[in-house]
Amino acid sequence: MTRKRYTPEQIIRKLREAEVMISQGKSISQATRQIGIVDQTYYKWRREYGGMRVDQAKRLKHLEKQNLQLKKIVADKELDIQVLKETLNLESKNF
């Protein structure tokens, strides 16, 4: 079974649909089945996106991506520092 990836906008839309169905008296299982996801996905999405607007979700994803890029830069710089320290230690031992 293939997994479908949803955009934050689609996730928020599906959560809103589920909330409407639940407020109309349907169970969570019925609502999730009708919007095409399983209960676990609903609870995960609700934990991550519950109460968010679409623009907030877009901003969150953008910040997460930017944070990942910055972490990679820091890791690269740390590696450069370690290499320079080792090179300096080797040169000082040779003298």
Image (cartoon, grey):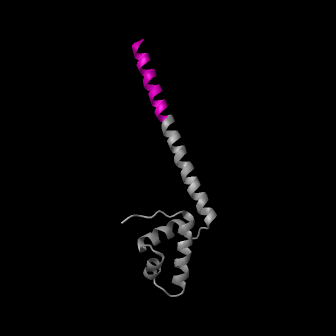
Q: In which quarter of the image is residue 2?
A: bottom left
Q: How many marks?
A: 0
The residue sitting at the top extreme is 95
Which quadrant does the C terminus fall into? Answer: top left
x then y, percent, for residue 80: 48, 31
Instruction: Locate residue 47 relative to residue 51 in the image: left or right.
Output: left
Q: Does the magenta stretch include residue 22?
A: no
Q: Quadrant of residue 12?
A: bottom right
Which quadrant does the N terminus fall into? Answer: bottom left
Residue 20 higher or lower than 52, as above or below: below
Majority secondary structure in the magenta region: helix
Instruction: Locate residue 2 relative to residue 8 in the image: left or right.
Output: left
Q: Is residue 81 magenta?
A: yes
x then y, percent, for residue 25: 50, 88
- Highlighted magenta segment, given as a residue range: 78-95
The residue sitting at the front extreme is 2
Q: Quadrant of residue 29?
A: bottom left
The residue at 46%/79% (across/down) is 34
The residue at 42%/74% (across/down) is 39
x then y, percent, for residue 17: 54, 77
Residue 11 higher or lower than 59, as above or below: below
The residue sitting at the right extreme is 55
The residue at 58%/53% (across/down) is 63
Seen from the viewer's position, the closer of residues 35 and 24 is: 35
The residue sitting at the bottom extreme is 25
